[in-house]
Image: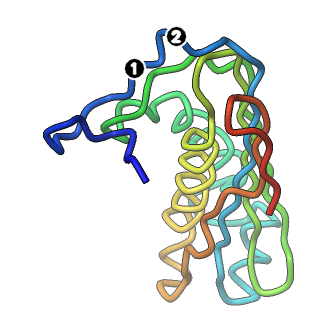
Amino acid sequence: MTLTHLNQLGEAHIVDIADKATTRRRAVATARLEALPETIALILGGTLKKGDALAVARIAGIMAAKKTAELIPLCHPIPLTSVEVTIVGDGAGLLVTATAETNAQTGVEMEAMTAASVAALTLYDMAKSHDRAMRVTAIQLEEKSGGKSGDFKR
């Protein structure tokens, strides 16, 4: 197997995408915030001392997707056409889902995962005074479409 981010000398480099076709690409990623039931209720109810954690986390996720190439060293900056972050309660936690879309020469998996991660971390930050035992877990790609490697669905 050839690693695309290493040159012939084994040095890290950014992949040349100049000859790749521009296609519509979409990725969906999730992250979970596990917390005490009362913490989840405070977040969902919008009654945390810091304010509306859901709104802040959605904006943080969108902003993070836009900054992915600055955070992940070998990611290409790509023009995002859409980023959506949703947060829902699911039992003992919150499920953050981020969807990123582009028309570009490379995929948006890292943008979607960055958005989900940062949104979950923002929820932690907003609620940490109430529950320091919270955990951000299960950051993962759920699905992607477009590009040479084809579609993926967990």
Name the secondary structure under disc 2. Answer: loop
**Left or right of 103 in this view: 79:** left
Disc 1 residue type? Asp
Rendering coords of residue 22 (x, y %): 67, 12
**Left or right of 77 in this view: 20:** right
Residue shown at 42% from the left, 33% from the top:
75
Quadrant the N terminus occupies = bottom left
Q: Which residue is mark 2?
A: 19
Number of numbered discs: 2
Rendering coords of residue 86 (x, y %): 80, 50
Quote the CA–CA distance across marks 2 and 1: 8 Å
Residue shown at 62% from the left, 34% from the top:
108
Report the front residue among 37 and 20. 20
The answer to whether residue 87 is above or below residue 19 is below
Q: Are marks 2 and 1 in contact (CB under 8 Å)?
A: yes
Rendering coords of residue 89 (x, y %): 84, 71
**Left or right of 62 in this view: 45:** right
Q: Quadrant of residue 49?
A: bottom right
Report the front residue among 82 and 53. 82
Residue shown at 57% from the left, 38% from the top:
111
Q: Which residue is mark 1?
A: 16
